[in-house]
Image (spheres, rainbow, N blue to C red):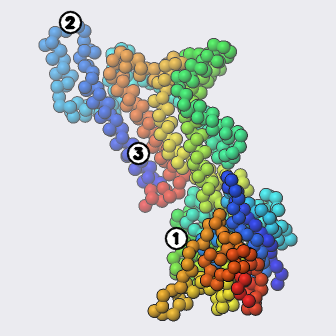
C-alpha cells in the first residue's frame, strides 16, 4: 500500500476584520490507498474545514495559511485554480451532508450527472449516459434509465444521497471525502447508506475520509480514526484500538458518553463545559480547561501528537 | 402542465370580472350618460324618458350584467369627446404605448441580466460598485426628471435626438401605427424608452444581484464547485436558473406596472399613447374612456401575469408536478 493523501503541518486561518482565527492548527495525517479514515469531533472542531481545505473549497474568508497537502505527487495547497478544478470531482469526490440541499432543484438528475463527466473528460452524451446508468445501478437505484430524466424532488432523501454517491463514483475517484453523509437521514436509511459506502470503497479500493460526529458510524466503516478538538488532532490511530481503549481524556469522555457503552442504571458520563470558540482556545493544551487530569504543564505547553505505549498517537502530556 | 395552465387562465378571468366590476362602479357613480348624450335645452321630462329608455333606472346588478355583456362583445361605450366608440379610440392609441413598453422592456431585460449577474459574481469589484451606486441613483430619480434631463442633454444641448412625438409611423395590418420600422420613428423611441426603463432597470439589476448572491451561497452551488464543473456552467446554469424563479415572478408584475407608468413618460414626451389619452380623458371628464382605459390596462396586466406564471411553471419543475397531479 502506498500513501494516497498526506497532509503535513496544515494551518487554516479565517481572516476577520481585525484579527485572524486559526480554525485548523498544525494538523498532519495520511490516508493510504483504499484506506477509510474517520474524522470525529464536536461541531466547530474543524472537521469540515479540514475536508474542504483538501479540495480548496473553504468558505470565505478562510484560507490555507501554511502546510502541505500531497496528493498523487501534487501539493494541493499550492495548485492553480485550473489544476484544482480538474482534481475536484475527478480524483477527489465529495459527498455533502444534506441530500435535500446538495442537488440543484431545477436540473434533472441526468444533467447533474453528465456535467461531472463532461467537466473532466471529452465524452459524448450517449457514452456519459451509459456511465451514469451504470453507476446508478451500482447504488441500487431501480429503472435508472428513466430516473435520469427526473428532478431531485421526485426522490426521497435516502435516494438522493444514493444519487450523490453515484455522482461521486462517476469518475472512479481514488479518494472520497464524505462530510457527515448520514446526519440528515433517519437511522434505517443511515445504515443502508453506510453499508453501501463500505461496499463500494472495498470493491473499488477507494480511499475514504469520513467526517462525522457519530462515533457509532465511524466504528462501523473506518479502519483508523482521527479525533479532532478545537482545530487540532488529539488522537489518531486504529479504530479497533481507540474504541476499545481510548487514550486522550477527551476521547475517553466522548466514548464514556455513549449510551450503548454505559452500564445499565448508571448515569451517563459527560465532559464538563463546552468546547471553546476559536478566539478563546486556552494556551497550552486546548483541552486543559475541561480536563480532569490537568497539571501545570498542560496550561503552558501545547502537547505534540506522539505515538504512545498503546500504539496510538495521542496529543497529551499525561498519557504515557 | 395543461391543468396548471387552465387553472391560471381561470384565475385571470376572475380577476378580470373584479376589475370590470370596479370599472363599472366608477362609471355608474360618476358619469351621467344623459348629460353626455344631449344638450342643455332638453327638458327634465325628456331626460327622464331617455333615462328610462337607456335602462338607467334598472337595478345596479342588472346594469352591470348588461355592461359585462357589451364588454365581452367589444363594446365599452362611446367617448363623448371623440364621438367614437372607446374601443376604437383605445385601439388607435394602444400601439404607441405597447411599442414604448416593449422597447423599455427590451432595455430592462438585456441590460439587467448581464449587469445583475456580473455584480453578483464579483460583488467587491470596482465595476460592481459603480453599477450598484448607479442603480441607486436611477431608482431615486423620478421618471419625469430623468425624461427632462434627457431632453435637455440630447435634444436641447446636443441636438441628437427629437424631443417629442412619435415621428414617422407606418401603418401595419390596417390598424397598427408602428414607429419601429422607420429610422425617424426609432430615433423618437430612444429617449422615451430609456426614461420609462429608468426605474425598472435599476430595480431589476438589484433584484437579480441579490437573488443570485443568495443562490451562490447555497449548498448545491457549493456542491457544483466540488464536482469540478467549470465556473461558467456553475454561474449561468446552476445559479442563474435558480435566480430566474423569483425574478420572473416579480418581473411579470413590474412589466405590467410599466404599462401604467407610461402616463408620466408619455406626458413629458407628448407621446400619443394610452397614457396621455387617459390624462386627457380625466381632464375632460370622459368617463367611458377613463373606465375602458382601466379595464384595458387591467386586461394587459392579467394577460402578462398569466403568461409569466405559465413560464414560471416551465422553469420550475416542482410547479409542473403539482400542476399534473
Q: Identify the residue position indicated by label 2 in the image.
A: B41
* Viewport quadrant of the C terminus of chain A: bottom right
Between A267 and B159, the one nearer to me in the picture: A267
Dot 3: chain letter: B
Dot 1: chain letter: A
Outermost residue on the top side: it is: B41
* Helix, strand or loop status at disc 1: loop
Question: Local crowd at mark 3 within 10 Å, few (<14), some, or many (≥20)?
Answer: some
Gap in angstroms between the C-alphas marked 1 and 2: 80 Å
Question: Local crowd at mark 2 within 10 Å, few (<14), some, or many (≥20)?
Answer: few
Q: Quadrant of residue A16?
A: bottom right
Q: Identify the residue position indicated by label 1 in the image.
A: A156
Between A297 and B149, the one nearer to me in the picture: A297
Q: Identify the residue position indicated by label 3 in the image.
A: B9
* Helix, strand or loop status at disc 2: loop
Q: Is residue B322 above or below residue A288?
A: above
Q: Are marks 1 and 3 on the same chain?
A: no
Q: Are marks 2 and 3 on the same chain?
A: yes
Q: Residue at x 48, y 29 (%)?
A: B261
Q: Quadrant of residue B117?
A: top right
Q: Position of residue B15 (x, y in %)?
A: 36, 40
Q: Is residue B149 above or below residue A234?
A: above
Q: Position of residue B294 (x, y in %)?
A: 38, 29
Q: Is residue A203 above or below residue B313?
A: below
Q: Position of residue B293 (x, y in %)?
A: 39, 27
* Helix, strand or loop status at disc 3: helix
Gap in angstroms between the C-alphas marked 1 and 3: 33 Å
Q: Is any part of residue B244 visible from this angle?
A: yes
Question: Local crowd at mark 1 within 10 Å, few (<14), some, or many (≥20)?
Answer: few
Q: Position of residue B273 (x, y in %)?
A: 48, 22
Amino acid at each position: 500500500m502506498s500513501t494516497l493523501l498526506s497532509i503535513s503541518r496544515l494551518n487554516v486561518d479565517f481572516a476577520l476584520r481585525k484579527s485572524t482565527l486559526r480554525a485548523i492548527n498544525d494538523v498532519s495525517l495520511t490516508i493510504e490507498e483504499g484506506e477509510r479514515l474517520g474524522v470525529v469531533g464536536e461541531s466547530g472542531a474543524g472537521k469540515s474545514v479540514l475536508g474542504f481545505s483538501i479540495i480548496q473549497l473553504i468558505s470565505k474568508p478562510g484560507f490555507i495559511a501554511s502546510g502541505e497537502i500531497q496528493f498523487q505527487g501534487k501539493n494541493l495547497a499550492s495548485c492553480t485554480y485550473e489544476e484544482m478544478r480538474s482534481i475536484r470531482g475527478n480524483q477527489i469526490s465529495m459527498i455533502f451532508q444534506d441530500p435535500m440541499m446538495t442537488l440543484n432543484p431545477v436540473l434533472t438528475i441526468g444533467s447533474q450527472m453528465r456535467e461531472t463527466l463532461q467537466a473532466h473528460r471529452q465524452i459524448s452524451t450517449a457514452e456519459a449516459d451509459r456511465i451514469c446508468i451504470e453507476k446508478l445501478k451500482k447504488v441500487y437505484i431501480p429503472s435508472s434509465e428513466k430516473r435520469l430524466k427526473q428532478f431531485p424532488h421526485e426522490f426521497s432523501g435516502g435516494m438522493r444521497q444514493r444519487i450523490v454517491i453515484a455522482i461521486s463514483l462517476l469518475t472512479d475517484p481514488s479518494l472520497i471525502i464524505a462530510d457527515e453523509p448520514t446526519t440528515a437521514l433517519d437511522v434505517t436509511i443511515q445504515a443502508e447508506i453506510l453499508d453501501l459506502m463500505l461496499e463500494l470503497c472495498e470493491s473499488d479500493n477507494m480511499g475514504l475520509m469520513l467526517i462525522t460526529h457519530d462515533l457509532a458510524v465511524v466504528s462501523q466503516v473506518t479502519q483508523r480514526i482521527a479525533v479532532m478538538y478545537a482545530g487540532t488532532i488529539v488522537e489518531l490511530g486504529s479504530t479497533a484500538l481507540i474504541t476499545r481503549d481510548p487514550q486522550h481524556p477527551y476521547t475517553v469522555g466522548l466514548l464514556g458518553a455513549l449510551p450503548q457503552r454505559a452500564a445499565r442504571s448508571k448515569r451517563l458520563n459527560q465532559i464538563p463545559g463546552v468546547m471553546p470558540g476559536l478566539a478563546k482556545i486556552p494556551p497550552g493544551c486546548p483541552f486543559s480547561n475541561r480536563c480532569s487530569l490537568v497539571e501545570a504543564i498542560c496550561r503552558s505547553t501545547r502537547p505534540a501528537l506522539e505515538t504512545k505505549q498503546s500504539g496510538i498517537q495521542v496529543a497529551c502530556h499525561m498519557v504515557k | 402542465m395543461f391543468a396548471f395552465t387552465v387553472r391560471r387562465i381561470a384565475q385571470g378571468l376572475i380577476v378580470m370580472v373584479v376589475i370590470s366590476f370596479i370599472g363599472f362602479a366608477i362609471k355608474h357613480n360618476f358619469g351621467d350618460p344623459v348629460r353626455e348624450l344631449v344638450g342643455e335645452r332638453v327638458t327634465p321630462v325628456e331626460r327622464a324618458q331617455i333615462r328610462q329608455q337607456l335602462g338607467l333606472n334598472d337595478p345596479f346588478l342588472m346594469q352591470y350584467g348588461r355592461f359585462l355583456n357589451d364588454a365581452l362583445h367589444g363594446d365599452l361605450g362611446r367617448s363623448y369627446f371623440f364621438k367614437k366608440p372607446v374601443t376604437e379610440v383605445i385601439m388607435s392609441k394602444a400601439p404607441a404605448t405597447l411599442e414604448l413598453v416593449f422597447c423599455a422592456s427590451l432595455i430592462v431585460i438585456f441590460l439587467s441580466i448581464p449587469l445583475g449577474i456580473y455584480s453578483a459574481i464579483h460583488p467587491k469589484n470596482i465595476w460592481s460598485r459603480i453599477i450598484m451606486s448607479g442603480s441607486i441613483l436611477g431608482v431615486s430619480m423620478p421618471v419625469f426628471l430623468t425624461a427632462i434631463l434627457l431632453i435637455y442633454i440630447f435634444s436641447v444641448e446636443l441636438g441628437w435626438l427629437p424631443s417629442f412625438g412619435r415621428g414617422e409611423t407606418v401603418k401595419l395590418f390596417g390598424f397598427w401605427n408602428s414607429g419601429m420600422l422607420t429610422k425617424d420613428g426609432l430615433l423618437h423611441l430612444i429617449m422615451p424608452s430609456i426614461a420609462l426603463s429608468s426605474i425598472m432597470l435599476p430595480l431589476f439589476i438589484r433584484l437579480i444581484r441579490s437573488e443570485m448572491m443568495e443562490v451562490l451561497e447555497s449548498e448545491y452551488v457549493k456542491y457544483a464547485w466540488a464536482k469540478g464543473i467549470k465556473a461558467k456552467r456553475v454561474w449561468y446554469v446552476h445559479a442563474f436558473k435558480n435566480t430566474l424563479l423569483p425574478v420572473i415572478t416579480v418581473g411579470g408584475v413590474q412589466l405590467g406596472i410599466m404599462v401604467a407608468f407610461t402616463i408620466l413618460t408619455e406626458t413629458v414626451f407628448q407621446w400619443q399613447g394610452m397614457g396621455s389619452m387617459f390624462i386627457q380623458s380625466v381632464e375632460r371628464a370622459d368617463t367611458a374612456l377613463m373606465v375602458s382605459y382601466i379595464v384595458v390596462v387591467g386586461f394587459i396586466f392579467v394577460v402578462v401575469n398569466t403568461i409569466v406564471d405559465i413560464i414560471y411553471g416551465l422553469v420550475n419543475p416542482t410547479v409542473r408536478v403539482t400542476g399534473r397531479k
